[in-house]
């Protein structure tokens, strides 16, 4: 009985329409090339690179200390790209280091991801790679012990970018499992002459819209990977900064900070004797550069510095470009620059987020902020104006690495008001997370309630009933998010898109627990930015 062909692991890319074999390869002149008559008699189909055998790099580190002679060991590396034409499109299969020979400008983004989502049964997913967009970008791989639906992976589809998926295809002729991102990974028993027919099946799967039934959210939010589009967006940003058209631009620390020990921010383009600013402003940075000096390279070289309050030294610093939060509409898509990365957002999804945030109740009765105020001063002013209790920086230590505020202002009716200035997208993400976490702890943690009552009683015993001893009825508490803003941006609460996504997610969670949720934007008179 003849033995069936062994399975071969393949990595398959789809090239953009109009791309040629030689046009998508880097360092073409350095590659060896060969024809495969079964695939194409008129053009070369295999391009490869290799290095001759050489002693491994670690040998020089280990060998001098070895007693006796080590055997002659050699290492080599190689890579190849195999081109397959099918259904009028060109595919590239890579082997070894072959993926590095391809210019990513010429590859279709999310080809493999769409093939998998169009080919697998929705309850036959094995693994998911995701990237969560928040104040810190978090990459995760989540595997399940048996094939499951997407809900088993615990994704938040409004904030989690689906980067790769592994699942079992409905059609077993496609292989036992498929893994899709930009590339498609598979095992197959198909030989080289059969690859065009296999590629045709995958092209049909890529062009289908079956994924929209269960996985339509992948179209809402995607990383922008086209170098040409990124260059166009960078040009838009530089032009906006030069013209000081900054209603859609602000600066944000791109990672979490110890805000209790932050005096303020400075820029590397400022003199040492200039005062820090409590809120990093794009207008402040632009005053340090003439318009013609504002270039992409300058944004990469100049830095924003966070200054510690405890000793006046730098706590952290980042390139200005990594701190810029910018959004612009182009070709019926919203593009957002956040923490140095560009994202493409479907306009329907943007409007859905705006609509959900606009439906939230508005907290009335708060005073406007004074010009140049900080959060602590405003919290005192707000508490006085509404007859509440200021609990700013009154922290509960729960034995873990973090301390938690109950809220910034507590009302007699049990309202939990959380306040932040709109200077940083990451600060606002922290605001929404703080409000969610403290409400959840109030609901579920008796120790948290007990310590909260001790703090409240120490500040003003008249507010003690606002924090119950027993598990509260969440409907009796309102969680409010208040943003101090100078911006005139025409968005809900003047917030940038990713801040609105974080607010929407927190509000949905709180409503799920039964809490009432409200928001407010209070004005601080100042120059926009």
Image: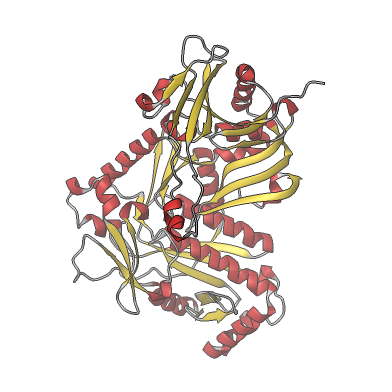
- Residue 257 as seen in the image, left or right of residue 397: left
Quarter location, residue 370: bottom left
Residue extending furthest toward the top: 42
Image coordinates for residue 326, horizontal then vertical, percent? 37, 48
Residue extending furthest toward the right: 1
Which residue is found at the position 33% from the left and 51% from the top?
A: 321
Quadrant of image for the C terminus: bottom left
Residue extending furthest toward the front: 68
Image coordinates for residue 72, horizontal then vertical, percent? 49, 45
Which residue is found at the position 72% from the left and 25% from the top?
A: 173
- What is the basis of the colouring in this image? secondary structure
Which residue is found at the position 39% from the left and 68% from the top?
A: 368
The residue lying toward the viewer, choosing from 310 and 436, is 310
Residue 243 in sight in this render: no
As drawn, 219 above or below 506 = above
As drawn, 92 above or below 299 = above
- Residue 489 as seen in the image, left or right of residue 430: left
Total marks drawn? 0
Quarter location, residue 512: bottom right
- Residue 412 as seen in the image, left or right of residue 102: right
Residue 316 in sight in this render: yes
- Residue 391 as seen in the image, left or right of residue 317: right
The residue lying toward the viewer, choosing from 123 and 158, is 123
Image coordinates for residue 255, horizontal then vertical, percent? 43, 61
Image coordinates for residue 455, horizontal then vertical, percent? 56, 86
The residue lying toward the viewer, choosing from 486 and 210, is 210
């Amino acid at each position: 009985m003849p033995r069936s062909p062994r399975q071969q692991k393949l990595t398959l890319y789809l090239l953009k329409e109009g791309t040629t074999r030689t046009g998508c390869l880097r360092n073409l002149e350095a590659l060896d090339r060969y024809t495969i008559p079964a695939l194409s008699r008129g053009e070369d189909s295999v391009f490869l690179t290799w290095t001759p055998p050489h002693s491994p790099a670690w040998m020089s580190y280990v060998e001098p200390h070895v007693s006796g002679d080590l055997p002659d060991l050699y290492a080599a590396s190689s890579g190849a790209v195999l081109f397959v034409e099918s259904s009028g499109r060109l595919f590239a299969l890579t082997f070894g280091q072959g993926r590095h020979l391809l210019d990513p400008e010429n590859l279709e983004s999310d080809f493999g991801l769409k093939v998998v989502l169009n080919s697998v049964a929705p309850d036959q997913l094995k693994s998911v790679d995701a990237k969560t967009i928040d104040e810190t970008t978090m990459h995760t791989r989540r595997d399940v012990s048996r094939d499951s639906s997407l809900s088993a992976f615990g994704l938040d589809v409004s904030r989690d970018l689906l980067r790769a998926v592994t699942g079992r295809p409905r059609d077993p002729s496609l292989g036992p499992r498929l893994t899709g991102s930009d590339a498609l990974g598979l095992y197959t028993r198909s030989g080289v002459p059969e690859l065009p027919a296999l590629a045709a099946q995958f092209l049909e799967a890529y062009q289908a819209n079956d994924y929209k039934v269960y996985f339509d959210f992948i179209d809402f939010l995607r990383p922008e990977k086209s170098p040409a589009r990124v260059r166009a967006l960078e040009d838009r940003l530089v032009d906006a900064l030069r013209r000081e058209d900054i209603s859609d631009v602000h600066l944000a620390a791109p990672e979490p900070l110890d805000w209790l020990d932050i005096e303020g921010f400075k820029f590397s383009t400022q003199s040492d004797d200039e005062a820090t600013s409590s809120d990093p402003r794009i207008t402040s940075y632009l005053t340090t550069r003439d318009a013609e000096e504002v270039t992409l390279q300058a944004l990469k070289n100049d830095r924003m510095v966070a200054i510690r309050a405890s000793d006046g030294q730098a706590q952290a610093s980042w390139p200005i470009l990594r701190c810029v939060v910018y959004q612009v509409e182009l070709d019926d898509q919203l593009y957002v620059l956040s923490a140095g990365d560009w994202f493409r957002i479907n306009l329907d999804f943007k409007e859905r987020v705006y609509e959900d945030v606009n439906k939230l109740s508005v907290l009335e009765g708060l005073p406007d902020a004074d010009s140049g105020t900080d959060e602590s001063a405003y919290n005192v002013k707000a508490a006085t104006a509404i007859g509440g209790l200021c609990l700013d920086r009154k922290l509960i230590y729960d034995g873990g690495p973090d301390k938690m505020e109950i809220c910034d202002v507590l009302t007699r009716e049990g309202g939990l008001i959380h306040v932040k200035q709109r200077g940083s997208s990451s600060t606002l993400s922290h605001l929404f997370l703080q409000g969610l976490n403290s409400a959840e702890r109030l609901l579920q943690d008796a120790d948290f309630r007990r310590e909260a009552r001790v703090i409240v009683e120490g500040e003003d015993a008249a507010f003690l009933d606002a924090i119950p001893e027993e598990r509260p009825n969440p409907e009796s508490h309102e969680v409010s998010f208040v943003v101090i803003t100078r911006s005139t941006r025409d968005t809900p609460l003047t917030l940038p898109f990713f801040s609105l996504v974080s607010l929407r997610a927190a509000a949905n969670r709180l409503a799920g627990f039964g809490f009432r949720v409200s928001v407010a934007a209070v004005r601080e008179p100042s120059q926009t930015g």
